[in-house]
């Protein structure tokens, strides 16, 4: 990881922070050296700041890039991103940050992460989060909010941020205490992959500060089975008896790197294939069994074919 840090110029430096404190920062001593695959803080509660708990949980889940705009709400964490091997990619508008995290997730099949200043910075996320929601992109949307003691009193750029994203996220977490920072951060990454969509991590800005004794949980490996024997047998029976079966191929196929398998299935069954909206990449466009895409600006051939299907 230390070698990877040389590939970009950090936006911030920890040198002044380290000189001003006798304490060795948790992120620098534990993450950057990266000498232990099973560090003690996996199982033993360890003293750290809540920002370090947040940052180390990001690292544990493989975060290497965060897209956003610098804001005072999360400055303590931002200062230690470089030491943890996280590159902060600054943008000109918060909407761009979500779109970039969405694109990153689609290309890498790993959670994309974005963050911004509380209030107006977070409301600028809305359009990008909605796009990620309908694309089923695993995006972790980090939304710092006004301090916990100022809520309901017109605190700095205060607004109720959770309802804003309630219909365009798969899961929402509100960090109710710095002691639960690592827990909720980790849980958001799990849900982003399990539910295949954006999740919101809402953090009162004062919860980034102070010491906590915490464990950094290990990430959860998400595996998806092919289905149980009974379900597979039932599907095979439906296909065998179908008169006009149609395959719909979409984003899930692309994310699973399963385009070749869908081609083999279509060819073996000699079944036409329609692509979902915005996912013409889910089946070769020059293949004779491809009918085109469905939905807005879709293909008439695809629309007519799907309207007559008895098994999809």
Image (tube, rainbow, N blue to C red):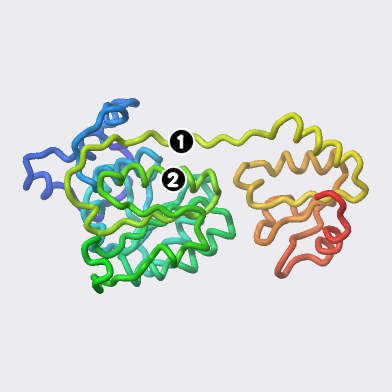
Q: In the drawing, does residue 169 fall left or right of residue 45?
A: right
Label 1 Cα crowd, 10 Å radius (few <14 / some 14-19 / many 20+)? some
Label 2 Cα crowd, 10 Å radius (few <14 / some 14-19 / many 20+)? many
The image shows residue 304 at horizontal and vertical percentages of: 86, 63
Q: Are marks 2 and 1 in contact (CB under 8 Å)?
A: yes
* Mark 2 or 1, nearer chain start: 2
Up-down relation of residue 256 to residue 88 (above or below): above
Q: In the drawing, does residue 203 fall left or right of residue 98?
A: left
The image shows residue 109 at horizontal and vertical percentages of: 53, 45
Per the image, the residue denoted by label 2 is 189
The quarter holding residue 59 reads top left
The quarter holding residue 303 reads bottom right
User: Disc 1 on helix, strand or loop?
Assistant: loop
For the residue pair 3 and 184, the one nearer the viewer reads as: 184
The answer for how far apart the CA atoms under marks 2 and 1 are is 9 Å
Name the image quarter holding the N terminus.
top left
Q: Residue drawn 26% across and 66% down?
A: 151
For the residue pair 12 and 242, the one nearer the viewer reads as: 242
For the residue pair 85 and 188, the one nearer the viewer reads as: 188
Q: In the drawing, does residue 89 fall left or right of residue 177?
A: right
Q: Tag on residue 220?
A: 1
Q: Tag on residue 42?
A: none
For the residue pair 290 and 306, the one nearer the viewer reads as: 306
User: Disc 2 on helix, strand or loop?
Assistant: helix
| Observer able to see residue 6 | no
The image shows residue 230 at horizontal and vertical percentages of: 76, 31
The image shows residue 242 at horizontal and vertical percentages of: 90, 45
Q: Residue drawn 64% across and 33% down?
A: 225
Q: Residue drawn 35% across and 42% down?
A: 183
């Amino acid at each position: 990881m230390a070698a990877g840090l040389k590939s970009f110029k950090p936006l911030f430096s920890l040198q002044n922070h380290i000189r001003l404190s006798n304490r060795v920062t948790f992120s620098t001593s534990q993450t950057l050296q990266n000498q232990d695959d099973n560090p003690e803080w996996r199982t033993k509660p360890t003293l750290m700041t809540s920002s370090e708990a947040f940052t180390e949980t990001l690292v544990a889940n493989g975060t290497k890039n965060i897209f956003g705009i610098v804001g005072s709400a999360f400055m303590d964490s931002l200062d230690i991103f470089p030491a943890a091997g996280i590159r902060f990619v600054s943008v000109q508008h918060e909407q761009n940050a979500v779109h970039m995290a969405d694109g990153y997730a689609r290309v890498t099949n790993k959670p994309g992460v974005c963050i911004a200043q509380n209030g107006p910075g977070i409301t600028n996320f809305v359009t990008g989060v909605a796009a990620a929601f309908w694309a089923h992109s695993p995006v972790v949307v980090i939304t710092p909010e006004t301090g916990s003691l100022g809520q309901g009193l017109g605190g700095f750029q205060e607004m109720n941020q959770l309802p804003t994203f309630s219909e365009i996220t798969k899961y929402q977490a509100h960090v109710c205490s710095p002691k639960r920072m690592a827990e909720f951060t980790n849980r958001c990454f799990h849900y982003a992959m399990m539910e295949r969509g954006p999740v919101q991590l809402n953090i009162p800005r004062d919860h980034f500060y102070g010491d906590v004794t915490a464990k950094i949980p290990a990430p959860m490996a998400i595996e998806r089975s092919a289905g149980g024997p009974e379900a597979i047998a039932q599907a095979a029976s439906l296909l065998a008896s179908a008169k006009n079966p149609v395959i719909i191929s979409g984003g899930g196929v692309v994310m699973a790197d399963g385009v070749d398998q869908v081609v083999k299935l279509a060819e073996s069954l000699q079944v036409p294939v329609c692509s979902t909206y915005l996912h013409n990449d889910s089946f070769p466009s020059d293949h004779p069994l491809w009918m085109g895409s469905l939905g807005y600006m879709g293909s008439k051939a695809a629309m007519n074919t799907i309207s007559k299907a008895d098994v999809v």
